[in-house]
Amino acid sequence: MMTEAIALGFGLYMLAAGFSLLATPDRARAMLTDLRESAGLSFLCGVVVYFIGAVLLVTHHKIDTPLEIFVTAISAATLIEGLIFLAFGTSFMRLMNPLLTGNLIRLWGLVAIAAGAFLAYLGAGGH
């Protein structure tokens, strides 16, 4: 039950983020610029993302089913992303900048929507 709830949560988050990237790419670019240019904001983002990943990984470390493996992997990736933001912050965002410009940001939105819909479906009990 916890696995499905976490999958649903990640799926809904990915859907919302994907629709935001697709519908308001300028807003998304502005947020990414803020992260790239503000060391304090980047560090705070790292703290929040790290602790979300850590809590999820501590409470959900299961690898018995494909969905459990995937949820555990996403939780670990979230923790690692937080550590990267803490350690490298603005430098990391500058490195990622080419992947987040132009129409690529809309492509990431479509990818997030597809992945989010799939995770939300699995989390809601789909098979």
Image (cartoon, rainbow, N blue to C red):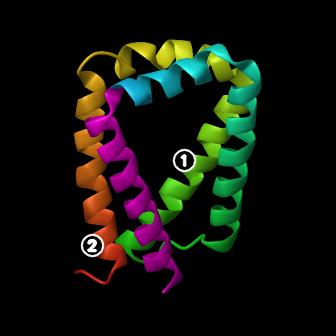
Tag 1 residue: 77
SS for dot 1: helix
x and y percent of residue 11 in the render? 38, 62
| Type of amino acid at the residue the image marks with label 2 | Tyr
Residue that carries the numbered disc 2 in the rendered image: 121
Residue 26 to residue 73: above or below = above
Residue at 73% in and 19% down: 39
Rendering coords of residue 42 (x, y %): 68, 27
Q: Is residue 49 magenta?
A: no
Q: From which residue to which does the magenta span run?
A: 1-25
- Say which residue appears at 39% left-offset and 62% top-offset: 12
Looking at the image, residue 100 sits to the left or right of residue 35; the answer is left
> Which circle marks residue 105 in the picture?
none
Question: As displayed, is residue 58 above or below residue 93?
Answer: below
The C terminus appears in which quarter of the rendering?
bottom left
Question: Horizontal and vertical percent for residue 64?
Answer: 45, 77
